[in-house]
Amino acid sequence: MRKQLIGKIISDKMRKTRIVVSETIRQHPLYKKYYKHRTKHYAHDEKEESKTGDIVLIEETRPLSKLKRWRLVKILKKAEQ
């Protein structure tokens, strides 16, 4: 099983590459306050069918370039125009 994440596309300016942001809620070890932690993932979109604002499912894969380690599995929700 490969890791899968759900995130939102924040950039589609590169060819066949999308930048996806995933958010997790973490707790500070000392102060016990909860906060949102955001991580950027570079994902491969072979068919270039996703756009900025889409909610997508990405999956871990072999290294495709210097930064790309994820690939787009499917679009869960299209962005509103």
Image: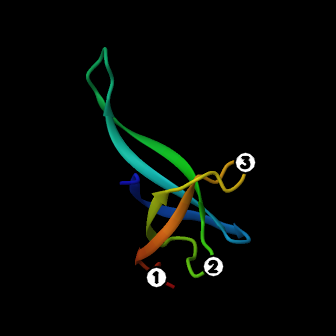
Q: CA distance from mark 1 to mark 2?
A: 18 Å
Residue drawn at 31 percent across, 14 percent down: 30
Q: Residues within 10 Å of mark 2 (few under 14, many from 20)?
A: some
x then y, percent, for residue 37: 42, 40
Of labels 3 and 1, the one closer to you:
3
Identify the element where label 2 is drawn: loop
Image quarter (top left, top right, bottom left or bottom right) of the N terminus: bottom left
Left or right: residue 39 versus residue 30 is: right
Residue drawn at 44 percent across, 74 percent down: 74
**Residue 55 quadrant:** bottom left
From this viewpoint, which residue is outermost toward the left? Answer: 32
Q: Which mark is residue 80?
A: 1
Identify the element where label 1 is drawn: loop
In the image, residue 26 above or below residue 71: above
Residue, disc 3: 66
Left or right: residue 38 versus residue 65 is: left
**Residue 44 quadrant:** bottom right
Residue, disc 2: 48
Of labels 1 and 2, the one closer to you:
2
- Amino acid, disc 2: Glu
Q: How is the image coloured?
A: rainbow
